[in-house]
Image (spheres, rainbow, N blue to C red):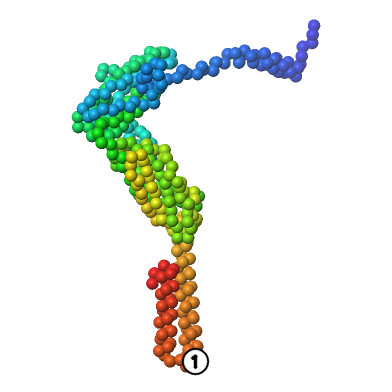
């Protein structure tokens, strides 16, 4: 009969049994863990319908005279295994304050192109799994619609997401391209200098502008910026507040800036601004002004002392008083010239 282990032996035996149970139970526990979820199937998409085979269209392009009815078709594609219900509506395209494209709902009573879009009885579409639906729609251009571009969009809304497809709509008639640059200002200093400005599309067609920057300085010949395309599509009647980096700006100077904006078909638009550039920005300008005033005060003090010294010398040499008065006028003139040169107030 084997001996019965003591209290210490029983403890060691229990620890060994627990370790063995953990070792042999680990694979079973891992097998009971839930499997990683499979990647979700892509959600539904919306795009202009295309002939098959045929190239994909990134947007709708429709054109016609005022009073006409234009037609096109939208494709809704659901490649997943879940059914969706998608609601369709028209919207007006717009520029955000920074120039980015956005959409806004077509408001009742407003003559925006979004309100011209109609889906008939198909404004709500059910998409079964792995199906594609082609939805026709019309754009009814009012008889009094002005010529030019009328940007719009078709917006499809479903569970948890929205998709917009742009419509480039042009109403027949004279096309006017007109661009202006306004509200130019400078901020920052050194390599972080930035020129802020506003572009305004005053015509009736969409513009893709370019911008060039030139500068003239008092102390330097600052480098400008050659014309470059801006990442903005400016819609008719819209404005955008933009910023242009100017890393080559002088560290300390009084500069005159000229911005020149161009766009296809539009006359060049220019705007000018003048600015002080100094290290530290406003604080640097304030320090420079104080130094200028201090220099003016020091120069005036030196002139007064020099005048007093010359008076004493003239008195010692016995010069007439009229010569002393002429010398006083001469020194007053010198002080005036010094004040005008430094720009300090009299």
In this rendering, the answer to whether 172 lies above or below 300 is above
- Residue at image x 22%, y 29%? 66
Foreground of the two, 281 or 169: 169
Foreground of the two, 287 or 205: 205
Q: Position of residue 86 (x, y in %)?
A: 34, 19
User: Residue 109 appears in which quarter of the rendering?
Assistant: top left
- Do we see residue 321 in this rendering? yes
Q: Position of residue 67 (x, y in %)?
A: 21, 27
Give the residue at mark 1.
Answer: 317
Q: Position of residue 258 (x, y in %)?
A: 39, 51
Quarter of the rendering occupied by the N terminus: top right
Q: Is residue 180 left or right of residue 302?
A: left
- Residue at image x 34%, y 26%? 60
In this rendering, the answer to whether 259 lies above or below 106 is below
In this rendering, the answer to whether 68 lies above or below 175 is above
| Residue that sits furthest to the left in the current view | 143
- Residue at image x 43%, y 84%? 327
Q: Position of residue 28 (x, y in %)?
A: 62, 12
In this rendering, the answer to whether 12 lies above or below 172 is above
- Do we see residue 78 in this rendering? no
Secondary element under disc 1, as helix, strand or loop, is helix
């Amino acid at each position: 009969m084997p001996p019965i282990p003591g209290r210490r032996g029983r403890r060691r035996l229990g620890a060994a049994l627990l370790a063995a149970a953990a070792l042999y139970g680990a694979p079973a526990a891992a097998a009971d863990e839930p499997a990683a979820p499979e990647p979700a199937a892509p959600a539904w998409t919306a795009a202009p319908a295309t002939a098959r085979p045929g190239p994909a269209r990134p947007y709708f392009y429709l054109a016609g005279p005022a009073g006409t009815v234009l037609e096109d078709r939208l494709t809704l594609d659901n490649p997943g295994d879940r059914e969706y219900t998608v609601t369709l509506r028209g919207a007006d395209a717009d520029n955000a304050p920074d120039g980015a494209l956005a959409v806004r709902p077509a408001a009742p009573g407003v003559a925006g192109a979004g309100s011209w879009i109609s889906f008939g009885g198909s404004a709500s579409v059910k998409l079964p799994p792995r199906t594609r639906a082609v939805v026709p729609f019309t754009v009814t251009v009012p008889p009094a619609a002005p010529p030019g571009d009328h940007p719009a969009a078709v917006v499809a809304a479903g569970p948890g997401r929205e998709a917009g497809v742009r419509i480039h709509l042009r109403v027949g008639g004279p096309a006017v391209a007109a661009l202006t640059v306004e509200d130019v200002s400078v901020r920052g200093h050194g390599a972080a200098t930035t020129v802020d400005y506003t572009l305004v599309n005053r015509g009736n067609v969409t513009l893709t502008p370019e911008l060039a920057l030139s500068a003239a300085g008092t102390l330097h010949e600052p480098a400008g910026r050659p014309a470059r395309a801006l990442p903005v599509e400016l819609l008719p009647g819209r404005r955008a507040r933009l910023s242009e980096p100017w890393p080559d700006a002088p560290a300390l100077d009084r500069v005159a800036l000229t911005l020149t904006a161009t766009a296809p078909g539009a006359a060049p638009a220019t705007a000018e601004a003048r600015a002080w550039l100094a290290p530290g920005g406003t604080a640097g300008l304030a320090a420079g002004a104080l130094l200028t005033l201090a220099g003016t005060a020091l120069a005036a003090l030196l002139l007064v002392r020099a005048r007093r010294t010359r008076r004493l010398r003239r008195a010692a040499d016995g010069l007439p008083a009229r010569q002393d008065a002429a010398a006083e006028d001469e020194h007053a003139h010198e002080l005036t010239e010094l004040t005008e040169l430094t720009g300090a107030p009299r």
